[in-house]
Amino acid sequence: MDIILLTPFDLGLAASLVILLAIFSEYGRLKLGIGRKLVIAAVRASVQLMAIGLVLKVLFESNHPLLMMLMATVMLLMATREIAARQEMGFVGWWGFAIGGLSLLLSSFLITLFALTVILSPTPWYTPQYAIPLLGMLLGNTMNGIALALDRLTREVVRERGAIEARLLMGHSWQMAIQPYMREAIRAGTIPIINTMAVSGVVTLPGMMTGQILAGNPPGTASNYQIMILFLIAAGTGFGISAGVWLASRRFFDERQRLRLDRLKKRA
């Protein structure tokens, strides 16, 4: 089956729907006031996707490991920044970025490496055609889960400060004092991927499967790839959230096991 190529006019037709929504949000009865944000987000997405298309073309043609490492590093740094930016309150200093970055490194990067070297085994193993999409999907989903979990954790710890300090006064360790809120944070972060897996193939056709079908691959092959991706994302999200929540929880307490909310700051 031939691939249908999209022209600038086709993209303009799709963009007109976003513009229509922006106008409705600004001048409709509810006056939502999100029109400007919608337009900015749409322009930003268009520029970023066109730019990454050019970058990927260079990567695919060169197939050089150093360029792959550079691309992966940029992706990690951007995802780390997004984790910090999405939280209402974050840790002061470099910890605000280190927790997210380490969590992504221990989950998404290692699982992507496992998928490339053990499951798919392309030659070479860092082939951009496989490495970049895998890492991108894992980073994106893990990033969302970690951001949700850390935001829930910081909110709960600030709100339940009195209860946590009361447990510490009773002789509980910092792990026992904060454990209920760690549990709730991990649950909150894993809800999106659990919901995604629960409705995949019934309510929605996930991105990789849809892309492969549109590219002309057999539905059976597309579904196998999507199953693999969902399992990798679930593992990456779960391990990433667990690492992030543990690192953040440890940071809440000093060496004398005192709760240190002064290590938090409200995001602008």
Image (cartoon, rainbow, N blue to C red):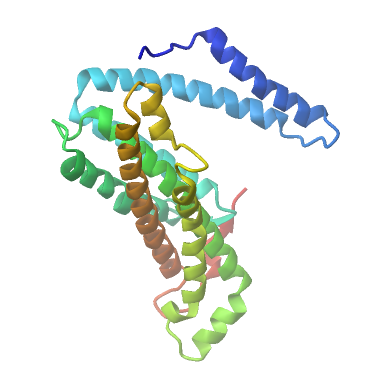
Residue 15: x and y in percent read 61, 19
Q: Nearer the viewer, residue 25 or 13?
A: 13
Q: Is residue 122 left or right of residue 195?
A: left
**Number of numbered discs overlaid on the protein picture:** 0
Residue 158: image location, x then y, percent: 60, 68
Can residue 12 be seen by looking at this rendering?
yes
**Residue 156 sits above or below residue 127 on the image:** below
Residue 89 image-quadrant placement: bottom right
State the residue at coordinates (37%, 61%): 243
* 133 lies left or right of 195: left
Q: Is residue 73 visible?
A: no
- For the view shown, which residue lies furthest in the bottom direction? 170
Q: Quadrant of residue 71?
A: top left
Near-viewer residue (32 or 265): 32
Question: Where is residue 57, by image quadrant?
Answer: top left
Residue placed farthest to the left in the image? 123
User: Which residue is drawn at the image coordinates 13% and 30% (left, top)?
Assistant: 123
Position above or below: 24 against 107 = above
**39 up-or-down from 267: above or below:** above
Please state which of residues 29 and 69 is positioned toward the viewer in this rendering: 29
Residue 140, position as x, y percentages in the image = 43, 42
Residue sitting at x 46%, y 90%: 171
User: What residue do we see at 34% from left, 44% from top?
Assistant: 227
Q: Is residue 150 above or below residue 71?
A: below
Q: Quadrant of the N terminus?
A: top left
Farthest right residue in view: 29
Relative image position of residue 45 (x, y in whole percent): 52, 26
